[in-house]
Image (cartoon, rainbow, N blue to C red):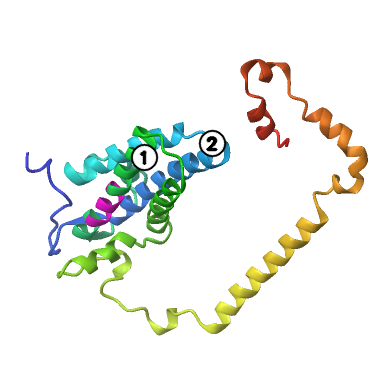
Amino acid sequence: MQSILEFGEQREGYGVRVLNERAVRASAGILFLFAIISFMNAWLTGNFQPTRVFVVAFLIDFTIRIFVNPRFAPSLIVGQWIVRRQQPEWVGAPQKRFSWAIGFALALTMLYLVVINNVVGPVNLIVCAACLALLFFEASFGICLGCKVYNLFHRDRAELCPGGACEVEPAPGRRIGAAQFAVVALFAVAVGAAGARIAESGTPGVAASRASAEPAEAERCKVPDFAKALGHEEKWKLHNNCK
């Protein structure tokens, strides 16, 4: 029973229980994928049903992680399988548990708001954005934002952070210099200028002959009878880029 209800692994040479960071990042990427899909679906179509399903799945996954054993959490099982041929990177389990507790609290909040009470508003957006940020930084950069908060509430600072971030200061040669920041700034300016120019010129082939295009556009955006019969006129227009 003790081998089932435990958090992290006790491995030789490590003073704290550990987790495989590669599997953790893989699972974060999986959850982020489904989270962003459900979030954008709600944002663009107003359909919150996929979001409700994801919130329930997310809550179940994190309940198993925290209160049973991470080895039995579905997303971590899949993540571990995906990275099974990679060398494990062992990181401290205590700060991960704290970070996942934050995710669990966010999931409980969304369960109350979206699933139980069908609340739609800015609070949902803030909670979703926080959850997406945590998953994105974990999956993309290996940065555990919740683990950084862990140090604010615990005397014993986090050990064995991903990439040795808790123990190692960045070498001078790895710091970003002024020239590199300038390149990024110029790149952003160039992309912004290109976007503004494209927006001014309009879509090729449409702005060239607006008068002649309007009748054809009206014909293209004529809602078919089957969509009217289903009561899906607005959704048909949305999916076919018709205003």
User: Which kind of residue does numbered mark 1 sit on?
Assistant: Leu
Q: Which residue is mark 2?
A: 46
User: Which kind of residue does numbered mark 2 sit on?
Assistant: Gly
Mark 2 or mark 1, which has the lower sequence index? 2
Q: Is residue 209 left or right of residue 46?
A: right
Residue 39 seen: yes
Task: Give residue 102's mark.
Answer: none
Q: Give me the residue at 27% from left, 43% from top.
A: 62
Q: Is residue 205 above or below residue 94?
A: above
Task: Give residue 113's mark.
Answer: 1
Q: Is residue 188 above or below residue 208?
A: below
Local packing at callout 1 (Cα closer than 10 Å; few below 14, some 14-19, many 20+) is: some
Image coords of residue 29 (percent x, y)? 41, 49
Q: Give me the residue at 13% from left, 55% from top.
A: 10
* Mark 1, secondary structure of its residue: helix
The stretch in magenta equals: 98-104
Residue 186 falls within the magenta-colored stretch: no
Residue 144 seen: no
Quadrant containing the C terminus in the rendered view: top right
Image coords of residue 2 (percent x, y)? 7, 43
